[in-house]
Amino acid sequence: MIIMPLRLLDFVPEALKNTYLDLLILAGLILAIIVQPIAGAISDRSGFAWGRRRPFILLGTILALVFLPGIGLCGSYMAIFVIYCLMQIGCNTAQGPFQGFIPDLVPEGKRGSASGVRALLNMAGGIALIRLIGPLMDRYLIGRESWGLWLSLGVLAIVLLGAMLATVLTVKERPGTGGSQLPLLPTLYKSFKIDAKATPNFILFLVCCFLIFTAWGTLLAHALYYLMDVVRVTEPGKVASELLIVVGICMLAVVYPAGRLSDRVGHRPIAISSGLLGALGIAALYFSKSYGWVMLSGGLLGICGGAWISSQWALATDLVGKGEEARQLGLVNMSIAGAGATSRLIGPAIDFFNAITPNLGYKVMLLACFLFFITGALLLMRIKGRGLTKVG
């Protein structure tokens, strides 16, 4: 959220920065849509002696680390475009199989709590990264001090390497059984296949994920430029990091309790409540006129995000089929990546409406996010089956 928007300002016109940023991230998300389900399906069917998931996590992380320095070395928009896409291939090769760990290793009645812990650790790491990287990238933006960029990339590299080593060395998997022995092409085809009649709840859940993550993706994609253009902060990297820290702290405060609560009352009610709270956070942000109000809105959105992440992932693991965990969770991530891709299409619209009336494009953006949250929450009410009431 911080490195790429500021790095792109080296190569693209100011008036088209939203458009160029969205084209870049859109390409990466399309790759995520393609790579994650394929990697997950191959992982489900793999027969490695040291597990179905860890070999792909090792390979994907190494690929990402190889291409990461290219973000600092590239000298044009096209070069950074190619480097970013190659990194996405590596990251999603690892992430697709990684999603299978919770259904592989956690009993059904504990998945809300496990999802809460997973989200808690993800956000704690994210907050720490943002706090480190935001001020470093401000030095790069304001003073053109390249060391700020390189230190930011170095921090990312250390985190990626450490997470990969911790996973590969400490997670205990059973040896892969080999699963289905279909040839490669049928396996790839089956990676994206969904039986609509057999899994109507799962399909409806994918639509809900798409809508709610489209709202989140739109906010995250354009938050830095929003702070620069609407709130008019002088240190956008620093303020963006502070906003994300507020969001992250509120998420941390609720993510584990929400996961525990979802195990007791059902995963769906918590997910619905989070969607409605997200709409309230957007409404507050729309009427925000100052730094303080922006932070308050961020707090509401953080509570929404914490409740959503823990309950959404627990509900997802309830709805996937036996033996298809990583593939179908890869499809969930495909829906999320598709939402991210859709959220990037609003960049040209923001630039278009801003050209008509200053900051009109950002108002259109917030209205779209509000509608996505509301519609996603309402559709969740139609899902039937496991995870709707108390488990066990």
Image (cartoon, rainbow, N blue to C red):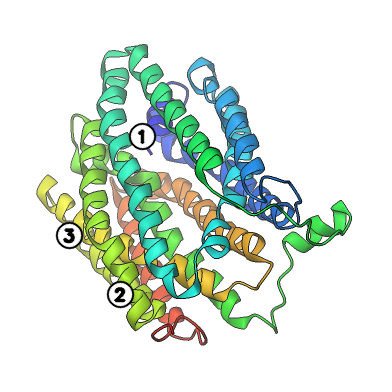
User: How much space separates mark 3 and mark 1, taking CA atoms?
Assistant: 24 Å
Disc 2 target residue: 261
Q: Is residue 173 above or below residue 239?
A: below
Mark 3 and 1 residues: CB-CB less than 8 Å, in contact? no
Dot 3 or dot 1, earlier in sequence? 1
Question: In what element is the residue under mark 1?
Answer: loop
Residue 131: x and y, percent? Answer: 25, 34
Tag on residue 2?
A: 1
158 sits left or right of 273 in the view: right
Quadrant of the snapshot with the N terminus: top left
Res. 97 mark = none
Residue at 50 percent across and 70 percent down: it is: 107
Tell me, yes or no, if residue 356 can be seen here: no
How packed mark 2 is, by other alpha carbons closer than 10 Å (few <14, some 14-19, many 20 or more), is many
In this rendering, position of residue 218 left or right of residue 173 = left
- Tell me which amino acid carries mark 2: Leu
Q: Residue at x 65, y 80 (%)?
A: 199
Residue type of the residue flagged with mark 3: Phe
Disc 2 is placed on an element classified as helix
Q: Answer whether residue 5 is visible to the viewer in this image.
A: yes
